[in-house]
Amino acid sequence: MSLSVIIPTFNEAHTVQRAIDSAWSIDANEVIVVDGGSCDQTVQIAQASQAKVIFSVRGRGTQLNQGAKIASGRILMFLHADNAVSVDCGKQLRAEFQNPRIQFVCFYQRIENLSRIYRWIERGNWFRARYRQLPYGDQALTVTREAYDRVGGFDEIPLMEDVRFSRNLAREFPPEVLPGPLLVDDRRWRERGPVRQTLRNWWTLLRFQCGATPERLAEFYHRGDSLPPGSDSQ
């Protein structure tokens, strides 16, 4: 199995090292960091970690597509910079993609906070991915090149590109949720509070389903944000 891991970044110097190291730990054939104009040490750290660094207009959908364009792997993993795959994720991927019918997988999350409320959030995210067939980008969306090409990649919109991508894929390739765990930094929940952040995610998705534009949703979602615009863990 040839695996390309694609990581979009914007000012992720404090997280990108771990994301890259975790990708190498599952024997990725290549790690591609697509930077959207960082002004911190993100690029230097990525280069020192033996990742292939390319540059793009900022916007996660655009960055992910640019990474996929140069990726050589049959399997494409889209990994957020504040996520880290465990060694078990790699073993599960290799077992799963031996089945030619499997085209789209994601992972059960482990949010890095010991509070019990995060276990409920993890289960809720698993339920959404498993039964609504709607994994988010912070579940390490992993697809075959064939499936990616079939749906035309990500929509290049300011928010909800992962939701559109998952919906488009699930029409033909229902996702398998692998046990992982995928490690997820708790920074956005920590900044806003787990209940408030979860409600914000639900409200954003509901508005999207009711026809709100990604541009308006992005303005709402990032209002008062102190994190990099590309770092939302929905």
Image (cartoon, rainbow, N blue to C red):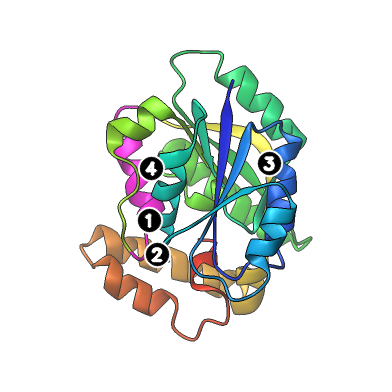
* Marks 3/1: CA–CA distance: 21 Å
Pointer 3 and pointer 1: residues touching (CB < 8 Å)? no
Name above or below for residue 131 compared with residue 44. Answer: above
Residue position for label 1: 62
**Precedes in sequence: disc 3 or disc 4:** 3
Gap in angstroms between the C-alphas marked 2 and 3: 24 Å
Mark 3 lies on residue: 23
Tell me which amino acid carries mark 4.
Ser
Count of numbered circles in the view: 4
The residue under label 4 is 166
Q: Earlier in the sequence, mark 2 or mark 3?
A: 3
Q: Residue at x 47, y 69 (%)?
A: 199
Cα distance between the residues tagged 1 and 2: 7 Å
Please name the predominant secondary structure of the magenta segment in the image: helix
Q: Secondary structure at mark 1?
A: helix
106 left or right of 167? right
> Which comes sooner in the sequence, label 1 or label 4?
1
Q: Which of the 4 quarters of the picture holds residue 87?
A: top right
Question: Mark 1: few, some, or many residues within 10 Å (few <14, many ≥20)?
Answer: many
Which disc is residue 57 wearing?
2
Q: Nearer the viewer, residue 176 or 41?
A: 41
Disc 4 packing (10 Å; few <14; some 14–19; many ≥20): many
Q: Earlier in the sequence, mark 1 or mark 2?
A: 2
Tag 2: residue type?
Answer: Val
- Magenta residues (range): 158-173
**How busy is the neighbourhood of tag 3: few (under 14 within 10 Å), some, or many (20 plus)?**
many
Question: Gap in Å between the C-alphas at discs 1 and 4?
Answer: 16 Å
Residue 143 screen position, x and y as percent = 46, 32
The type of residue carrying mark 1 is: Thr
